[in-house]
Image (spheres, grey):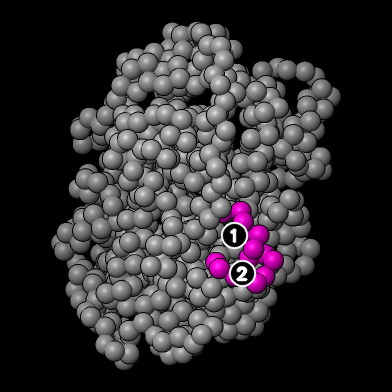
Amino acid sequence: MSNPTTARTEYGGIDPTDPGFPGGNDDPTAIRQSAATSAGNQETPVAQPASETDLGSQSARPELGAAQAENAETRLSGDESRPGDQGIDRKAVAGPSRAAESSRPGSPRRTADGSTTAQTDDTARPDRREDGEPTESTLLHVDRLRVDYRSSAGPITALAGASLRVARGEVVALVGESGSGKSTLAHAVIGLLGATAEIGSGTITFDGERVDTGSERALQRLRGARIGFVPQDPGLSLNPVRRVGDQVAEALLVHRFADRRGARGRVLELLTEVGLDRPELRAEQYPHELSGGQRQRVLIAIALACGPELIIADEPTSALDATVARRVLDRLAERTAARGTAVLLITHDLAMAAERADRLVVLNGGEVVESGPTAGILAAPRHPYTKRLLSSAPSLAPGPPRQERPRTGEPLLVLREVRKRFRARSGEAITAVDGVGFQLGRGETLALVGESGSGKSTTARIALRLTDADHGTVVFDGEDLTAARRGRLRALRRRFQVVYQNPYSSLDPRWRVGAIVEEPLRAYGIGDRAARRDRVRELLGQVALPERFAERRPAELSGGQRQRVAIARALALHPDLLVLDEPVSALDASVQAQILELLDRLQSELDLSYLFISHDLAVVRRISDHVAVMRRGRIVETGRTAQIFEDPRHHYTRELLSAIPDPARGAA
């Protein structure tokens, strides 16, 4: 493996004239071994260092495969455990040269910079029937598609005759809970289903031509060049040992939209378009040097690089803060209106879907249960499942802020004038935290909100002594945490724990749930084996998981169930403080509501304090007592939740609040 500190190639890192260059080689094996391009994925993800936004060491990432497609057995309190949105064996993608791409009537003509010319009349947004279905200019048509996953227990159905249409220039949102089959449908369209998946029946038609899902060559003509794909997890989708700029350039080089000399300028344009600051610096960095939101923007830049006719965006903003999500989605909307680019938006964020989509398609259990114009479904949902989804969305049913709780006694956590600087590879000093201070009372929730890179997670790491501050003090329960050493620091650390953002990567896939929850007890030598087993049963009960789940592995659980396991593990040592780093951002709306209710109940029962890190202001409104708004390493405004939402003083706070998705704006 190349050393990321020394390995360097010419921009783009590959040579289109090489005989082994993907796109000029019809050998599927060679193609799969090539680096990811438009989908931004690797065949075999390589372990990468934790990013600046990760709070401390996490367990090894779970392998993606058939095991995750077999988790359809259990559904608990609405937590999904169906296959379809997990376990995809992603292939690297490559495509034909521009000369090999046929020119189709009505398709946008591409220019050398990857953009497209204005559309002709037949690619304009189509007229629609009263039920919202397009009457002409259909770009993508999925008709009665059935997909099964093979397992030792027999076939598991992920899609059971699902159908949808996407017209040119149209934005269609495919919504549903985890495991409903959303991602399975998207991956079927571009041939990224895993080896255990089998298309049993149905057809996929793109631009009037039936897609041969069994032909790698046919799929190469679509992926990247004509259909762009934005995968959900940037941690698994970017190569950790290649620079960001090289990975964006690769999409241009593979599809011959630029040579290596011209790729650099186009890469910087794309990084700017998706909202990355200092694109020259970002292009030279490695993925682990970017925040999660910044990595997701790189994936979006890769998908947009070749000016595709359709973009399939699989949870494209789940890792992004509200303002950046709005800018990214504004960019997609701009392409839709000006260039005829259609978007299939796969999301659990119903408020965002309602604001952005022309039509909604609701998927449940592999079947389309409701579809139609967005305004009609929001105003009068017909199916009970749709009604439940809408009632669970924080932005669609915001409710009042949490009732004010009077502060009593001394604060549990105090930060005073904390500063932290990092030095980039270029030698430039980056100030991550600049004079931050706040107090967190016992039994309270303080939310740190702000854009990616604003310093939220670095502040939380300093608060837990996972990173040492350059300046300032951290006081925990009256004791100076910055001065604590060795044994005393270890004793204090059992009183604060972390729940990480991604339940798919924070649990060791090799361990059973019981061992995962028991681990902190073993580490601190608490109790004998029988006592620890009793404590594990108690903890599973506290997070509303059946006792039998102790024998399961993470791959057998849904996202919501995994996050419950993570919370149970964090509670094992009876902590006073939980740091919750985006604890519900990777979950769909109904499971989000369940986890937030669980956190609220546990806080009342155990008198816990929460430091809640989030970019989702609708969630913050529901769970927080106080809010601190961070921008560029500083707290620009702090106050009671109701005060921040009803009477924001700082212009940046007002900008954050205005970025909350509003279906009324979409209707307008």
Residue neighbourhood size for the residue with mark 1, other residues' Cα within 10 Å, grouped as few (<14), some (14–19), many (≥20)? many
- Helix, strand or loop at label 2? It is loop
Give residue 150's position: percent from left, percent from top. 70, 67
Give residue 340's position: percent from left, percent from top. 32, 78
Q: Is 633 rendered above or below residue 263?
A: above
Front-lying residue, 338 or 214: 338
Viewer can see residue 274: yes
Instruction: Left or right? Give the position of 464 relative to 342.
Output: right
Which residue is tagged 2? 381
| Amino acid marked by disc 1 | Leu
- The residue at 31%/62% (across/down) is 331
Give residue 102's position: percent from left, percent from top. 31, 87
Q: Quadrant of residue 179?
A: bottom right
Front-lying residue, 159 or 384: 384
- Helix, strand or loop at label 1? It is helix
Q: Is 239 rendered above or below residue 608?
A: below
Front-lying residue, 100 or 488: 488
Q: Quadrant of the C terminus?
A: bottom left
- The residue at 34%/67% (across/down) is 333
For the stretch drawn in magenta, the main secondary structure is helix
Q: Which residues are magenta?
A: 378-393
Give residue 297's position: percent from left, percent from top. 35, 53
Question: What mark, if any, has residue 466 been given in the picture?
Answer: none
Viewer can see residue 43: no
| Amino acid marked by disc 2 | Pro
Q: Which callout, 1 or 2, points at the residue further toward the start of the chain?
A: 2
Which residue is tagged 1? 390
- The residue at 26%/87% (across/down) is 120
Q: Is 276 rendered above or below residue 164?
A: above
Report if residue 385 lies within the magenta region. Answer: yes
Instruction: Left or right? Give the position of 523 relative to 249.
Output: right
Asked whether disc 1 touches disc 2, contact meaning CB atoms under 8 Å apart, the reply is: yes
